[in-house]
Image (cartoon, grey):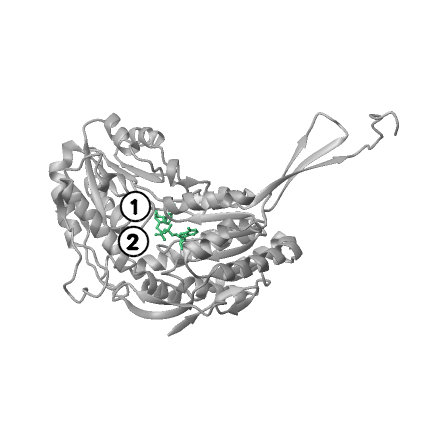
Amino acid sequence: MKIGRFFVGGEWVEAIAGATREILNPVDNKVIAVVADGSEHDARLAIECARKAFDEGPWPQMRAQERASYLFKLADLIEAHAAELAELETRNNGKPLREAQFDVADAAGCFRYYAGLITKPLGQTFEVSDPAIQCMVVREPIGVCAQIIPWNYPLLMASWKLAPGLAAGNCCILKVAEATPLTAIRLFELIAEAGFPPGSAQLLTGPGPTVGHALAASLLVDKIAFTGGTATGRKIMQDATGNLKKVTLELGGKSPNIVFADSDFELALEYALFAIYAGQGEVCSAGSRLILDKRIADKFLPRLGEAAARIILGDGLDPQTEMGPLITRAHMTRVLGYIEAGKAEGAELLAGGQQLTGGGLAEGNFVNPTVFVNTRSDMKIVREEIFGPVLAVQLFDTEEEAVHLANDTVYGLAGAVFTTDIGKGLRVLKRLRAGITWCNTYHPTFNEAPWGGYKQSGIGRELGTFGLDAYLETKQININMAPQKLGWFRGV
Ligand code: NAD
C-alpha cells in the first residue's frame, strides 16, 4: 500500500492535522493507496515555503540554461519510469493503459519542450524617440504560482502546469485532484531525484474548497493557474481578486464535431467514436456533440450505434480494454443522471444508456458508450458538459446551419470538421468560436501549440510559446546613455 505525503520545501511531510484520504481504483473501488489530506494550514505552509524560495532564491535567479538542465533531467527520469507511471495512472484514473502511455510520453515531451524554449530569445529592444535612451524589454518570472488540476489527466496536467511555470523561474505549488494524487506523488519523487532546489516545486493533496481555496485567495500567491470545471473556475477568479493575482483558467467544454456528407465515411465514423469515448468521455475537449449532415444520417447512425455497442469496457490494464471506468461512484451517478434527463426530455437512445454490471464490472464505475438521437438544442444533454461517454447527435441541412449549431453553446474549447472539401473545412473552422480546432482528425494535442478556450471555456492559453508567456512578467528597462541634468526645477 502506497502512503503519499506532501512535498514542501524539498521535504516529504505529513498533513499538519494528520488527516489522510483513501485512494480508490475506479475499476472495483478497492483502496490502492492512502495519502495525506491537506487543510488551509498545509496550504499556508506550502505558500510560505514557496514565497521564501522565490524571494531568496536560488531558483528564480538561476540562469535559464541551468534551470533547463533540471527540466531535461526530469524528462529523462519520466521516460526511464514510463512503464511504471503509465500503470499507476491507469490504476488510479481508470483510463486504458495505451492512453496512459501517451500521457506519460507527452509529459516528458512537455518538460523537454519548455527546457528548450526558456533558453531561446525572450526579450526585445526598441529604438525610441529619445536617441539617448536604449529601451529594452526583459521577461521575468511572476513569483509564487499556485496550480490546481483535475483528475482526468493527472500526470499530464501536472506537467502542463509545472514545466512552463518552473522553466520561467517561478516557485510552484501544485494541488492535485482529491481522487488522483498518485502519479503526481511519483513525479515529485522524480523531481526530488533530479535535485530541484528546495522550494522551487511543492505538492499538496487535499480538498478544493479548503486547500484550493486557500491557494486562490492567498495574498502571497502571485498567480493561479487552474484546470477544472467552469463553476470552480468562477469561484477561483473571485478568490483571486484580493491581490489581483494573475489568473489562467482551462475549463469545460461541449465541443462540436461536424461531419459533412462529403467526408470520408469510415474515417468520420471512427473519429466520431474516438472524439467522445477516448478517456471515457472524461476529456475537456471531447466531441460530445456530433453535428451530422442529414443526407448521410440514415447510413451513419446505425453504424455509429453498432460500433459504440461493440466498444470493450474493462480494466485499463487488460490489453483488450478499449474504455475504462468513470473516476468515482459519485461521478458515475452524475453521468447516469444526465442520461435519465435526456430520456425524460424526449431524446432517443441509439446505444448504451446504462451502468454495466455484467462480466465482473459491477464493483466498478462502468457506463456503456451512449448515443442520443432526436435531440433538441434546449436539452440538458446538448447544453451541459456531462464529462462522460454520452454523445448527443444533432442534424443539419446546410453549412450555415452546421456552424450555427456548433456555436450554440456557452463553451468554446474545441471543435472539428470532417469533409473532403478542404476549402469548406477551413471556412467552417474559421467560423467556430473555439480555441482548438481540427479538420479530418480529433484530439491531437501538441506541446508546441496553444491550448485553451473561447467564451466560458477559459482565460489564457497553456502550451507553446503562449503557455510560457502566461508564466512571465514583462519589464521595460530604459538606459540613459548620455545622462545630463534636466534643468526642470530652477532651484536644483
Ligand atoms: P473541479 O473543478 O471539480 O476540480 C478541479 C480541481 O479544482 C480539483 O483539484 C479540485 O480539488 C479543485 N477545486 C474544487 N473546488 C475548488 C475551490 N473552491 N477552490 C479551489 N480549487 C477547487 O473539476 P473536476 O471535476 O476535477 O474536472 C473536470 C472538469 O475539468 C471538467 O469541467 C473539464 O472540462 C475540466 N477540464 C478542462 C481542461 C482544459 O484544458 N480546458 C482539461 C481537463 C479538465
Q: Nearer the viewer, residue 356 or 257?
A: 356
Amino acid, disc 2:
Gly
How packed mark 2 is, by other alpha carbons closer than 10 Å (few <14, some 14-19, many 20 or more), is many
Residue 455 appears in view: yes
Q: Nearer the viewer, residue 368 or 44?
A: 44
The reply to whether dot 1 and dot 2 touch (C-beta < 8 Å) is yes
Judge: label 2 CB < 8 Å from ligand 1: no
Image position, residue 453 (x, y; %): 39, 39
Which residue lies at the image location 29% right of the left edge and 44% below the top edge?
385
Query: Dividing the image into 4 quarters, which one contains the C terminus?
Result: top right
Which residue is identified by label 1? 286
How packed mark 1 is, by other alpha carbons closer than 10 Å (few <14, some 14-19, many 20 or more), is many
* Count of marks placed on residues: 2
Examine the image and state in which quarter residue 481 appears. top right
The relative height of residue 164 versus residue 256 in the rendered view (above or below) is below
Image position, residue 416 (x, y; %): 30, 38
Image position, residue 27 (x, y; %): 26, 64
Residue 108 appears in view: no
Is 405 positioned to the left or the right of 147 in the image? left
Is 461 positioned to the left or the right of 245 in the image? left
Amino acid, disc 1:
Ala
Is 172 positioned to the left or the right of 375 in the image? right
State the SS at label 2: helix
Q: From mark 1 to mark 2, how far is it between C-alphas?
A: 9 Å
Image position, residue 132 (x, y; %): 77, 30
State the SS at label 1: loop
Q: Which mark is residue 279?
A: 2
Query: Dividing the image into 4 quarters, which one contains the N terminus?
Result: bottom left
**Sequence-wise, which precedes: disc 1 or disc 2?**
2
